[in-house]
Amino acid sequence: MSQFSFTAEELAKNIATKSLLNSPNQIVKHLLTDSRKITDAKESVFFILKGSKDAHQYISSVYSKGVFTFVLTNLDFDTSPFPNANFIWVNDSLKAMQQLMAKHRAQFSYPVIAITGSNGKTIVKEWLYQLLSPDFDIVRSPKSYNSQIGVPLSVWQMTDDYNLGIFEAGISKVGEMGALANIIKPNIGILTNIASAHDEGFESRQQKLEEKLLLFKDSESLILNSQYNHTDFKDKNVFTWSLTQIADLKISDIKSSLSHTVITANYLQQSVSIKIPFTNQVSVENAIICWATLLSLGIEQDIIAKRMEKLLVVKMRLELKTGIHQSSIIDDSYNSDFSSLDIALDFLNQQNQHPKKTLILSDIYQSGISTSQLYQKLASLLLNKGVHQFIGIGGQIMKHQNLFSTNSLFFKDTDDFLKNFNTANIKNQTVLLKGSRDFEFEKISKVLTQKVHDTVLEINLNAIVNNLKHYKAKLKPGVKMMAMVKAFAYGSGSDEVANLLQHHRVDYLAVAYADEGVALRQAEITIPIMVLSPEVSSFEALVKYNLEPELYSFRILEAFTEYLENQNIKEYPVHIKLDTGMHRLGFNPNEIEKLGSFLKKQSVLKIKSVFSHLVASDNDVHKEFTELQISTFTQIAAQIESNLKYPFIKHLANTSAITKWPTAQFDMARLGIGLYGIESVEEEKQALANVATLKTTISQIKDLKKGETVGYGRSGVMTHDGRIATVKIGYADGYPRALGNGKGFMLVNNTLVPTIGNICMDMTMLDISEIDTNEGDDVIVFGEDLSVYDVAKQLNTIPYEVITNISQRVKRIYFYE
Ligand SMILES: *Cc1c(COP(=O)(O)O)cnc(C)c1O
């Protein structure tokens, strides 16, 4: 596989406004935008993107890892400590990268398909890849790389070895598509659909549609639902499809059985059909889009029909599960190509909960490269990504085993591994499991993961990062971020979430009790941790694990001071909590003088911060009280500062205050519920991504007659002949008994259905008379389409209580897309 490269000098010639080249002949092959994702340091160029003031500080750490070439904006940056480096200054790093990629793209004359739309981009892209692979060598976006950064990184993969490109483009606000269009320059465009995603970035749906269509301004052909067709396209070769209107491909019938759907349509005055191995509505729409695309490319209907029957599930997400012997398993057992391996290895690298990292990998299928080159490349990738142990499975990998370092094992196939590998060797480590589908790595996954019963809480790690970024962007410059991970990270799971937050460089974590902090330290969390409710019995653990207590009263202050004096410890970091109106924990305003003189007299405590907590930052009714809290806090924090004669962090804002009360941001904000996708401020809800989805499944379905009763105490009475489903979640899992007898709802097959009868300890019955569903089907208890706000409302409580009540027996599965 040839790979494009520049010398640093050529790169500078293309984009620089000014440059300083100490190694002008340095070859550059890899575009790097994240200092934590280095693959091949020497041959990388690091683009310092937005927030560049902060990002410049990473130059020295990246340089020390061997990166020589930097694209930057800060003209004042002191380059003298980096004598071998190349510095290329530009006005805007992102634009420079995009321009460079537009030039790269222009070198290739083979066709490029671009896909945009609100939903389905990635599935359509992956299915087109499956459907068109017999005819073309295809280069495509890895995963869902469709952003302002993702698109250039995708297009950079184009080489002469391919003869078709398929890229997706996603936008979240006006003005973004033009740049993507210039990079992709598609010959063929596909619009999937326009739904509500990212509505907040646009004035109207129409504006969003128009922005999306900019992608296709220069393309020759276009495939879309006829409802989006437009007179502007009259010069283009437009292929339309529709369920309802006149179209080139007019769908006339959709029939689903248990495992298949037959879709029939009129095309060129003939009735044609395809059969796909999926039954849900979303898959049907995506398949129709692919069908229309293949027809418009001139592929014969017979061939299309054959290929459609073999469509495979697209699973783009990596799942992080609890494994055997205190290990974590990253399950990516659906595909193995090089770019997705690279992404999965970065995710492995981010997991620092365990000291050791293992990769279990099958043979890799990648066209356009000899196997010896391929495995050579793999071996050096593993060295660069810090994999401690490598297990290769498959005939090809085995043949090249001499390329890999000593700490590697090889098996000829999956059964060989299952028979001969001693799983006791998987202990206290993170394992990435990545294989092509025919290796059936799900068998390995079953052996290495703890048994998960069918009720799971899925945690979307991308959503947490999205929410963190959302609030970070609302902070004034220089304001720090403390993330609240108390109560098992609001039910989401402490180790994994804390690891993610540490990776994304929050400044502080906070837990409720010392033991929560100890667990985080044991999971290799090294950033500062504040403990909200320290107990005298936990002082030893606090100090041993470098946890920083909140001191809220003279009793606890004096006890901790005495403990430190006895241990002969000086300047131990602590936090002082003030009561400005919550009347829960904290020093009262009238105790501040006494506190000041106490603090002045001792040398064992180092005050890291002084803080208080707002009681109603989300509620305008208490506006004046919040103002009073802010001014009281300002005043007494200043009073303490004047006593201490050294600076400390002041903080007051929780989630809703970050946006509603910017004056309460002070030096740091304490982000809690918003991180987990929940907000009480209406305007902010839209911008957050859903984090948690509680899912269960149907164990049994029964037909009942009018008058028959359901469950304990006979409180659920059938008012009609109908059907009920028993699902595997009960009050012991955290589904409250108060939601029984029709008070609660779950989503089955995208339809809300009520509970019937009393909730049991481990089970709940649902009235499914009105819908079509099967035993074994998934049921959503809450998530994206049935929000936890609604569940909380039915319970007369707040979402905080619902999410933190999900019991520990419900396994958490983390995913990353
Ligand atoms: C829980 C907590 C927060 C976070 O509040 P949210 O409303 O979840 O953002 C902030 N500060 C303190 C002291 C807390 O206990």
Image (cartoon, helix red, strand yellow):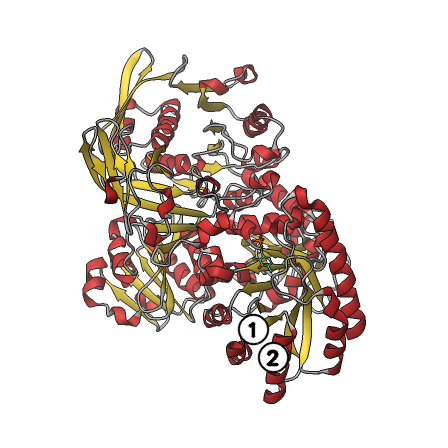
Amino acid carrying label 2: it is Phe
Q: Relative to the observer, which residue lies in front, 91 or 357? A: 357
Mark 1 vs ligand 1: CB below 8 Å: no
Please tell me whether mark 2 sits on a helix, a strand or a loop. Answer: helix
Residue drawn at x 41%, y 12% as measured from the top left: 246
Q: Quadrant of residue 149?
A: top right
Counting the numbered discs, the total is: 2
Mark 2 vs mark 1, CA separation in Å: 13 Å
Q: Relative to the observer, which residue lies in front, 132 or 475? A: 475
Percent x, y of residue 255? 26, 24
Q: Quadrant of residue 99?
A: top right
Percent x, y of residue 10? 64, 51
Q: Identify the residue under disc 2.
A: 560
Q: Residues within 10 Å of mark 2 (few under 14, many from 20)?
A: many
Q: Which mark is residue 434?
A: none
Q: Residues within 10 Å of mark 1 (few under 14, many from 20)?
A: many
Question: From the viewer's perspective, is residue 222 above or below residue 139?
Answer: above
Residue 559 placement, left or right of 446: right
Q: Quadrant of residue 206?
A: top right
The quarter of the rendering in which ligand 1 is drawn is: bottom right
Q: Is residue 565 visible to the viewer in this orientation of the structure?
A: yes
Q: Are marks 2 and 1 in contact (CB under 8 Å)?
A: no
Q: Nearer the viewer, mark 2 or mark 1?
A: 2
Q: Identify the residue under disc 1.
A: 547
Residue drawn at x 22%, y 36% as measured from the top left: 709
Mark 2 and mark 1 lie on one chain; the one further toward the N terminus is: 1
Percent x, y of residue 231? 55, 14
Amino acid carrying label 1: it is Leu
Question: From the viewer's perspective, is residue 356 above or below residue 253?
Answer: below
Please tell me whether mark 1 sits on a helix, a strand or a loop. Answer: loop
Percent x, y of residue 472? 63, 52
Question: From the viewer's perspective, is residue 786 above or below residue 494?
Answer: above
